[in-house]
Image (cartoon, helix red, strand yellow):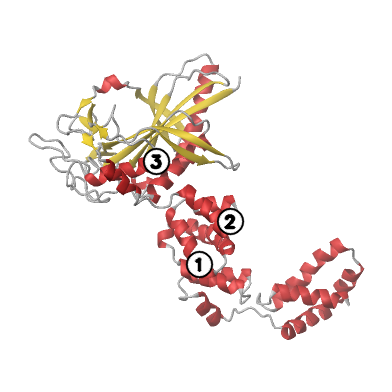
C-alpha cells in the first residue's frame, strides 16, 4: 500500500523584547539560574501581570508579514497544567481569540516549485522555565529565568506532505522572524523550536489518520529526521495490524527514534478560561497602519529583486535571501566589487564554506563585505586569477592583511599578463616538451583540447600560478598552430 504523511507544525518563537511579556524581568540569555525570575513571573499572591507593548507589536508585525488577519480584539486565557518548570500551575496564553488569524506562508522546494502553506493562527503566550538534567547527582534542577519570556506560537494547518516540506516551512518562518527582527531565531538557545504533528493515511484517502505530536525539536536537521522516523514507525505499526495512539512523543537524536511520553491531551483537559488578571487587548487600526510602514523588505520580495536587479539565478537568489544578514552582506560585497554574479558565487561558495568550517555566523565573518568586494575587483581586472584569489581570501580570513591589495602586494601575487614575459615562458615549455608538441600537432581536435591543458599546467607551474590563463591560452594556440 502507498502511504501519505500529513504534517502540521506548531512553531514557538521567542520574541526579542528586553523584558518579559508580563513583567519587567530581563530576558537576557545566559544569566545564572533563577536570577531573572520575579514574583510576577511566578504569579505569587498579590502580583498582577502587565502586557508588554513591544511583544504585542512584534506579534502584529508577524501577522502582517504573512498577510494574516489581525484580531482587533484578542483575549488572554489560562491554560492549566502542572510541570516542575511551571510552578504557578498555569500558562497565560490565547485560545479562542488569538492576536493573529489565518495567513499564508509560501515555501520554496528543492525542485524549484513553491507551495502555499496555510497558517491557522499565531498567538501570544509566555514561555515556561527549563528543567536541567545534568550535574545534579541524579536529580533535576529547575531554572526559571526563561519563565515569562514572550512567545508567539505559529500553528499551521496540516498542509505539509513530507519531512522536506516541513523543514522548508520552518526555514521560511525562521527567515521571516529574523528579517522582521522580532526574534534572533537561534535554535541552539531555544529561541525557535517546534512541535510536529505527524500522521499517515493511505494515498488518496481524505480522512486524516491518528496523529502523534513530537515535542520540542530544536534544529532543522532533527525536525527532518524526527518526522521521517515517526512516519516509518506509524506505517510499520499499521501494516503489522496495530493502531497509532494519539500521544505526545519525544525525539531521541542519539538513537534516532521517537518515544512515547504521555497520552495527548485535548483542549478541555487544560480547562482554558479567560485570564481574570488581563483585560481584552483592543488594537486601533492606526497602530496596524503605523506598523505597516516599518516593515522591511521580506525574503520573497528580496529574492525577486535579486533575480531582476542583479541577474542572479533563482537558486543563487534563494540561498542569498535565506537570512537577512547574508542578503545584506551580499549587497555590500556586490556594490564594492561591481560584479554581482561573481559576488554571489563567492558568498555562496568560498565564504559560506569557510563560515561552516569554522562554525561562524556571517555577522562575525573575519572577511568583511568590503574586503570581499575588493578581492573580487582584482579578479575582474585580471590582477589575480581565481586560484590566487582563494589564497588571498584565506590570508584575509586569517588576518594577514587589511585588504586584498595589501596581501597581493606583500606576497607578490599579482597576475602576470605581459605577453613578452609569458611568451618566453611558453617558448621554454614547448622547447622542453618536443614529443608532446609533435603529438599535439598530429592529434584530432578533441585530443588537442586535453593536451592543451598539459601545457597550460606546465606554464602555471613555472609562473607559480601567477600567469594569466587567458593570455597563456592565446599564446599557446598561436605558437602551436604555427
| Local crowd size for mark 1, using a 10 Å CA cut-off: few (<14), some (14–19), many (≥20) | some
407 to 344, vertically: above or below: below
Residue 232 position, x and y percent, is: 52, 27
The residues bearing labels 2 and 3 have C-alpha atoms spaced at a distance of: 32 Å
Q: Is residue 226 left or right of residue 418?
A: left
The answer for how far apart the CA atoms under marks 2 and 1 are is: 15 Å
Residue 154 x/y as whole percent:
37, 36
Q: Residue 49: x, y in percent?
A: 15, 38
Image point 58% across, 56% down: which residue? 312
State how far apart marks 1 and 3 are (Cα): 36 Å
Give the residue at mark 3: 218
Q: Quick check: marks 1 and 3 in contact, CB under 8 Å? A: no
Quarter of the figure that contains the N terminus: top right
Q: From the viewer's perspective, is residue 234 above or below residue 342? A: above
Of helix, strand and loop, which one carries label 2? loop
Q: Quadrant of residue 71?
A: top left
Which mark, residue 8? none
Query: Who comes first in sequence, dot 2 or dot 1?
Result: 2
* Quadrant for the C terminus in the image: bottom right
Of marks 2 and 3, which one's residue comes earlier in the chain?
3
The dot on residue 312 is 2
Q: Which mark is residue 335?
A: 1
Q: Residues within 10 Å of mark 2 (few under 14, many from 20)?
A: many
Q: In this rendering, does residue 14 appear at all?
A: no
Between 377 and 439, the one nearer to me in the picture = 377
At x 66% / y 80%, what residue is drawn?
A: 416
Asked whether residue 53 appears in the rendered view, the answer is yes
SS assignment at label 3: loop
Amino acid at each position: 500500500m502507498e502511504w501519505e504523511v500529513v504534517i502540521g507544525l506548531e512553531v514557538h518563537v521567542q520574541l526579542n523584547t528586553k523584558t518579559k511579556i508580563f513583567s519587567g524581568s530581563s530576558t537576557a540569555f545566559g544569566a545564572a539560574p533563577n536570577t531573572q525570575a520575579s514574583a510576577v513571573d511566578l504569579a505569587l499572591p498579590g502580583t498582577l501581570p502587565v502586557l508588554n507593548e513591544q511583544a504585542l507589536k512584534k506579534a502584529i508585525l508577524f501577522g502582517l508579514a504573512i498577510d494574516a488577519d489581525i484580531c482587533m480584539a484578542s483575549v488572554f486565557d489560562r491554560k492549566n497544567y502542572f510541570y516542575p518548570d511551571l510552578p504557578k500551575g498555569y500558562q497565560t496564553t490565547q485560545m479562542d481569540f488569538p492576536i493573529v488569524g489565518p495567513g499564508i506562508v509560501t515555501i520554496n522546494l528543492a525542485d524549484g516549485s513553491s507551495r502555499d502553506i496555510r497558517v491557522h493562527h499565531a498567538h501570544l503566550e509566555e514561555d515556561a522555565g527549563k528543567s536541567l538534567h545534568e550535574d545534579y547527582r541524579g536529580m533535576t534542577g529547575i531554572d526559571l529565568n526563561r519563565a515569562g519570556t514572550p512567545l508567539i506560537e505559529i500553528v499551521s494547518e496540516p498542509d505539509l506532505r513530507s519531512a522536506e516540506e516541513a523543514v522548508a516551512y520552518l526555514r521560511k518562518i525562521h527567515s521571516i522572524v529574523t528579517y522582521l527582527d522580532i526574534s534572533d531565531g537561534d535554535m541552539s538557545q531555544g529561541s525557535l523550536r517546534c512541535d510536529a504533528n505527524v500522521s499517515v493515511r493511505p494515498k488518496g484517502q481524505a480522512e486524516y489518520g491518528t496523529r502523534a505530536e513530537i515535542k520540542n525539536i530544536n534544529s532543522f536537521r532533527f525536525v527532518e529526521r524526527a518526522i521521517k522516523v515517526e512516519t516509518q514507525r506509524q506505517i510499520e505499526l499499521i501494516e503489522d495490524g496495530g493502531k497509532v495512539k494519539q500521544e505526545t512523543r519525544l525525539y531521541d537524536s542519539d538513537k534516532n527514534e521517537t518515544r512515547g511520553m504521555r497520552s495527548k491531551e485535548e483542549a478541555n483537559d487544560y480547562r482554558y478560561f479567560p485570564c481574570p488578571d488581563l483585560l481584552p487587548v483592543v488594537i486601533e487600526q492606526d497602530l496596524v497602519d503605523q506598523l505597516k510602514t516599518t516593515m522591511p523588505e521580506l525574503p520573497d520580495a528580496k529574492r525577486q529583486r535579486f533575480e531582476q536587479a542583479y541577474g542572479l539565478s533563482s537558486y543563487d537568489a534563494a540561498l542569498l535571501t535565506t537570512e537577512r544578514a547574508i542578503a545584506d552582506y551580499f549587497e555590500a560585497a556586490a556594490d564594492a566589487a561591481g560584479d554581482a554574479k561573481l559576488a554571489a558565487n563567492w558568498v555562496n561558495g568560498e565564504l559560506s564554506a569557510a563560515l561552516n568550517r569554522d562554525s561562524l555566523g556571517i555577522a562575525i565573518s573575519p572577511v568583511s563585505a568590503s574586503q570581499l568586494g575588493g578581492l573580487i575587483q582584482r579578479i575582474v581586472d585580471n590582477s589575480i586569477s581565481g586560484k590566487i584569489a582563494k589564497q588571498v581570501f584565506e590570508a584575509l580570513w586569517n588576518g594577514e592583511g587589511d585588504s586584498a591589495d595589501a596581501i597581493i602586494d606583500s606576497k607578490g601575487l599579482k597576475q602576470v599578463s605581459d605577453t613578452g614575459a609569458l611568451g618566453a615562458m611558453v617558448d621554454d615549455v614547448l622547447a622542453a616538451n618536443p614529443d608532446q608538441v609533435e603529438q599535439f600537432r598530429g592529434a584530432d581536435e578533441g585530443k588537442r583540447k586535453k593536451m592543451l591543458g598539459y601545457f597550460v599546467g606546465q606554464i602555471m607551474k613555472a609562473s607559480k600560478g601567477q600567469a594569466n590563463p587567458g593570455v597563456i591560452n592565446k599564446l599557446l594556440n598561436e605558437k602551436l598552430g604555427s
